[in-house]
Image (cartoon, helix red, strand yellow):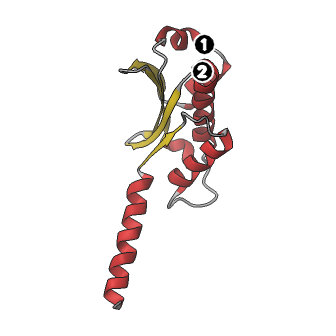
Amino acid sequence: MTVEEEMSRAVEELSMRVAAAAELTLDISTRPLPRRVRSAVAECVGFGRPRDERLGALLLVVDELVGNAYRHTARPSLLRVTRERRGLLVEVSDEDPAIERVAAGGGHGLRLIDELSHGWGVRATAPGKVVWALVPVHLFR
């Protein structure tokens, strides 16, 4: 393999890694341990960031949303983290259509999410619902 081919391959691999870091979709239907979920999010979101950059606010929001799905629904399905202009959008979907319970919840965890995010909410989907929060970028600086 020539030097140019090696460089081209290295650039392609790096490009694929950068593209993958823009969004994470994780199957949570098997209820992976919270530490595994946090590790997957930190690895994806942390790619290209300094090691000492804080991801605590994001990981707290992820923990709370995934934990709520585990505790309050029979069938959690996906965690998505997507980079947005104003922050990181965290979405947890499940197959339980009971939106009213989330909106009426008002527990400590939802108050924490409210404090750490630009906003949060819940929306109906075909099989159930998605609970989301937009974590601001400035919390990572």
Residue at the bottom extreme, as displayed = 2
Of residues 141 and 10, the one nearer the viewer is: 10
| Numbered mark located on residue 53 in the image | none
Residue occupied by mark 1:
106
Amino acid type for the residue under numbered disc 1:
Gly
Q: Residue at x 67, y 19 (%)?
A: 108
Q: Residue at x 55, y 8 (%)?
A: 104
Q: Residue at x 40, y 69 (%)?
A: 13
Residue at the front extreme, as displayed = 30
Task: Check whether the beta carbons of the residues at disc 1 and disc 2 lie within 8 A of each other.
Answer: yes
Amino acid type for the residue under numbered disc 2:
Leu
Q: Position of residue 44 (x, y in %)?
A: 51, 52
Instruction: State which quarter of the image contains the N terminus.
Output: bottom left
Asked whether, in this view, residue 63 is left or right of residue 89, the answer is right
As displayed, is residue 2 above or below residue 107? below
As displayed, is residue 9 above or below residue 96? below
Q: Position of residue 19 (x, y in %)?
A: 38, 56
As displayed, is residue 140 above or below residue 3? above
Q: Residue at x 61, y 40 (%)?
A: 59
As displayed, is residue 72 above or below residue 12? above
Residue 115 visible at all = no
Residue 60 visible at all = yes
Q: CA distance from mark 1 to mark 2?
A: 6 Å
Of residues 70 and 63, the one nearer the viewer is: 70
- Displayed quadrant of residue 105: top right
Circle 2 SS class:
helix
Label 1 crowd bin: few (<14), some (14–19), many (20+), radius 10 Å: few
Label 2 crowd bin: few (<14), some (14–19), many (20+), radius 10 Å: some
Q: Position of residue 11 (x, y in %)?
A: 36, 73
Asked whether, in this view, residue 97 is left or right of residue 107, the answer is left
| Numbered mark located on residue 110 in the image | 2
